[in-house]
Image (cartoon, grey):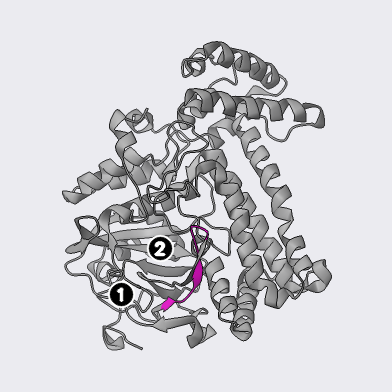
Amino acid sequence: MNIATPEAHSLDLGLNWHNSFADLGEAFFTALAPKPLPAPYWVGRSNAVAHELGLSADQLSSDALLQALSGNRHIAGSRPLASVYSGHQFGVWAGQLGDGRAILLGQTAAGQEIQLKGAGLTPYSRMGDGRAVLRSSIREFLCSEAMHGLGIPTSRALCVTGSNAPVYREAAETAAVVTRVAPSFIRFGHFEHFAYRQQPAELETLADHVIDRFYPACRTSTQFGGNRFAALLQAVSERTAQMVAQWQAVGFCHGVMNTDNMSILGLTIDYGPFQFLDTYDPGHVCNHSDSAGRYAFDKQPNIAYWNLFCLGQALLPLIGEQELALAALESYKTIFPAALQARMQDKLGLGQSPAEFAATDRSLIEDILALLAADRVDYTIFWRRLSQLPGGGSTEPVSDLFLNRAGAQDWLQRYTQRLGSIAAAPAAALMRQTNPKFVLRNHLGELAIRAARNMDFSLVSKLLMLLESPCEEHPGHESMAGFPPDWAGSIEISCSS
């Protein structure tokens, strides 16, 4: 194995690596070491992720860890590798892809995989340089932890390290490495790769690995005639449905839902041209590389199903019967709308509706979304202001958001009447937990990036603190929860973001 630093000089973090992915065999990856990043420095660190990994505060601030997570020092027990996968990109089969700028260090005893994004060239870099730039690394670091703070399944981010080494995109930028953490980084595209190459043995090895580690109930399931691979497809479909429902409820746009960016565990991964909605526009396209609008906000649920269908095709050699694969996908169509309905009812403070209120609540949800879209109302601010109503708060701050005040006041009258049928305190608590005050708006990320380019990382730290608990009030930080400035609309994010 190509390791840059001899084992005798390795850093021992006490993580007791297991490396189960590396044990799958050489068909699944290429073993190689990260490429050293010259003169690295800390950009941002998550104490919460460090604690979950069992790393101490001293370790997280040490130069030894800085060097190791920048590719300059081997970590004892890790087995660095880049995995191979394929996938559909913007609806078109792209063939072999793989970890073009990510190096998986391995799996810790706590069951978490640690990956360095931006760690240098791999055999799968294609025309790329294997590096990540500072701006995209800061965005991924902050959004990973923001999504976790919102309770949405996601990969996590331990830290970002930077360097003044130049990296060339549209213009010259500086390099950075994000240390990503997740139970697994296996994607739909890993299965597509072996299916397309007609390697059924490797396909089955991968599927059994995922079942045994993450979906053990599939092995003993009696559904689908005991077909464990159909049960796996159904389980992935259901997790994906729950995740996308949470995206839609909070106004999150992923931006590039290619099959190689879809987690087999139903996690949000690969933060590139993402955006949290400012004004509510169902057709909003956040990715300036997406000229056809394939990944528009309101198309995300259907794209997720399309991607699952591709996963079903990849698993078909193992499932054996097309009817079983289609049946395994069917639950997505019921779980997604039910999950989204439940999330929206929580945002309204209504919780699970008794049967007699079901039609009323559906109408309230549909009508307010139509009003928000018609007037391009700020999505996050609307829901946060609405959260003040239980217990007798004024409706005026809410109706002030609308040009169509008469329509808004009519809806608010209907809503407050419905709200009066439940206890105020539980409704208020539920709304405060589900309607964040702080989200990672594009302009906030941009301000943090601009400061970081001048070696000021204080805004990265401040945003991390707010986004870790986004539903808290955080007095003194109201400016971070206000309307976006006019220039925010000119920010362009693309697949290089």
Quickly name the residue at label 1.
Answer: 121
Q: Amino acid at mark 2?
A: Arg
Q: Position of residue 176 (x, y in %)?
A: 26, 61
Quickly name the residue at label 2.
Answer: 180
Q: Position of residue 19 (x, y in %)?
A: 48, 79
Q: Which residue is drawn at the image coordinates 54% and 75% (left, top)?
A: 193
Q: Position of residue 161 (x, y in %)?
A: 27, 61
Q: Position of residue 303 (x, y in %)?
A: 57, 52
Horizontal relation, residue 413 to residue 72: left or right: right
Instruction: Tell me the magenta residue range.
Output: 82-91
Q: Amino acid at mark 1?
A: Leu
For the N terminus, the quadrant is bottom left
Q: Can I make out residue 231 in this image?
A: yes
Q: Nearer the viewer, residue 109 or 222?
A: 222
**Any mark on residue 436, and which?**
none
Q: Residues within 10 Å of mark 1 (few under 14, many from 20)?
A: many
